[in-house]
Amino acid sequence: MLKRFFFAAVASTLMAMSALADGNMVKAEVVKVDKPAGKVTLKHGPIKNLDMDAMTMVFRVADQAMLDKVKAGDKVEFEADRVNGAITITKIGKGH
Ligand SMILES: [Cu+2]
Protein backbone atom coordinates (compact mmCIF):
# COMPACT_ATOMS: atom_id res chain seq x y z
CA MET A 1 0.00 0.00 0.00
CA LEU A 2 2.73 2.43 1.02
CA LYS A 3 4.88 1.20 -1.86
CA ARG A 4 2.09 1.91 -4.32
CA PHE A 5 1.67 5.43 -2.97
CA PHE A 6 5.40 6.04 -3.29
CA PHE A 7 5.41 4.82 -6.89
CA ALA A 8 2.51 7.13 -7.77
CA ALA A 9 4.31 10.06 -6.18
CA VAL A 10 7.50 9.34 -8.14
CA ALA A 11 5.56 8.91 -11.38
CA SER A 12 3.71 12.19 -10.99
CA THR A 13 6.94 14.01 -10.11
CA LEU A 14 8.61 12.65 -13.24
CA MET A 15 5.65 13.70 -15.35
CA ALA A 16 5.77 17.20 -13.90
CA MET A 17 9.51 17.38 -14.54
CA SER A 18 9.23 16.33 -18.17
CA ALA A 19 6.46 18.85 -18.72
CA LEU A 20 8.73 21.56 -17.31
CA ALA A 21 11.73 20.44 -19.33
CA ASP A 22 9.61 20.24 -22.51
CA GLY A 23 11.36 17.03 -23.49
CA ASN A 24 10.16 17.06 -27.10
CA MET A 25 11.22 20.60 -28.02
CA VAL A 26 13.46 20.59 -31.11
CA LYS A 27 15.81 23.34 -32.25
CA ALA A 28 15.43 24.63 -35.80
CA GLU A 29 16.04 27.51 -38.16
CA VAL A 30 13.14 28.92 -40.15
CA VAL A 31 13.76 28.70 -43.89
CA LYS A 32 10.38 29.87 -45.19
CA VAL A 33 6.98 30.82 -43.79
CA ASP A 34 3.82 30.28 -45.85
CA LYS A 35 1.11 31.65 -43.61
CA PRO A 36 -1.83 31.39 -46.07
CA ALA A 37 -1.08 27.68 -46.51
CA GLY A 38 -0.41 27.18 -42.78
CA LYS A 39 3.02 25.78 -43.57
CA VAL A 40 6.57 26.46 -42.51
CA THR A 41 9.87 25.13 -43.82
CA LEU A 42 12.34 24.33 -41.06
CA LYS A 43 15.93 23.17 -40.98
CA HIS A 44 15.48 21.05 -37.88
CA GLY A 45 17.54 18.93 -35.52
CA PRO A 46 16.64 15.30 -34.70
CA ILE A 47 13.00 14.83 -33.60
CA LYS A 48 13.13 12.02 -31.06
CA ASN A 49 9.39 11.52 -30.61
CA LEU A 50 8.92 11.13 -34.38
CA ASP A 51 12.12 9.12 -34.86
CA MET A 52 13.35 11.62 -37.47
CA ASP A 53 16.88 12.76 -38.20
CA ALA A 54 17.96 16.34 -38.81
CA MET A 55 16.82 17.72 -42.18
CA THR A 56 15.08 20.58 -43.95
CA MET A 57 11.39 19.99 -44.56
CA VAL A 58 7.94 21.56 -44.74
CA PHE A 59 5.62 21.25 -41.73
CA ARG A 60 1.94 21.93 -41.30
CA VAL A 61 1.11 24.05 -38.25
CA ALA A 62 -1.82 23.33 -35.96
CA ASP A 63 -2.92 26.97 -36.18
CA GLN A 64 -1.89 29.60 -38.77
CA ALA A 65 -1.62 32.23 -36.01
CA MET A 66 1.45 30.34 -34.76
CA LEU A 67 3.26 31.73 -37.81
CA ASP A 68 2.80 35.36 -36.74
CA LYS A 69 5.71 35.06 -34.34
CA VAL A 70 8.29 33.59 -36.72
CA LYS A 71 10.02 34.65 -39.92
CA ALA A 72 12.72 33.29 -42.25
CA GLY A 73 16.12 33.23 -40.57
CA ASP A 74 14.76 32.94 -37.00
CA LYS A 75 16.20 30.41 -34.60
CA VAL A 76 13.27 28.61 -33.05
CA GLU A 77 12.27 25.70 -30.87
CA PHE A 78 9.24 23.62 -31.77
CA GLU A 79 7.33 20.51 -30.94
CA ALA A 80 5.82 18.29 -33.63
CA ASP A 81 3.45 15.37 -33.52
CA ARG A 82 1.36 13.25 -35.86
CA VAL A 83 -2.15 14.73 -36.08
CA ASN A 84 -4.55 12.70 -38.24
CA GLY A 85 -1.56 11.12 -39.95
CA ALA A 86 0.14 14.40 -40.86
CA ILE A 87 3.23 15.63 -39.05
CA THR A 88 2.10 18.87 -37.47
CA ILE A 89 3.78 21.54 -35.37
CA THR A 90 1.90 21.87 -32.11
CA LYS A 91 4.19 24.47 -30.52
CA ILE A 92 6.74 26.91 -31.90
CA GLY A 93 8.64 29.80 -30.37
CA LYS A 94 11.88 31.73 -30.47
CA GLY A 95 14.89 29.63 -29.50
CA HIS A 96 17.91 30.72 -27.44
CU1 LIG B 1 12.13 16.22 -40.89
Image (cartoon, helix red, strand yellow):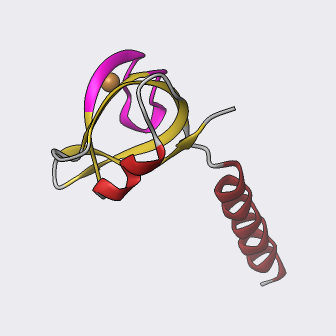
Magenta run includes residue 52? yes
Q: Is residue 65 left or right of residue 91?
A: left
Residue 69 at x, y = what percent? 48, 47
Query: Could you tell me which residue is drawn at 83 percent across and 81 percent down?
Result: 2
Relative to 53, residue 90 above or below: below
Horizontal and vertical percent position of residue 1? 77, 84
The part of the chain drawn in magenta is 44-58
In the image, residue 43 above or below residue 15: above
Report the residue at 66% width, 62% height from top. 15
Q: Is 61 left or right of 95, judged from the image as shown? A: left
Q: Nearer the viewer, residue 33 or 29?
A: 33
Residue in the image at 47% along x and 32% along y: 48
Whether residue 48 sits left or right of residue 40 in the image: it is right
Quadrant of the rendered structure where residue 13 is? bottom right
**Residue 90 seen by the camera:** no
Assess whether residue 87 is covered by the magenta stretch. Answer: no
- Give how far across and how far down residue 24 sits, in percent: 54, 42
Q: Is residue 25 left or right of residue 37?
A: right
Q: Quadrant of the C terminus?
A: top right
Residue 87 showing in the rendered view: yes
Residue 20 or 12: which is nearer the viewer? Answer: 20
**Residue at x-position 25% and y-position 45%:** 35
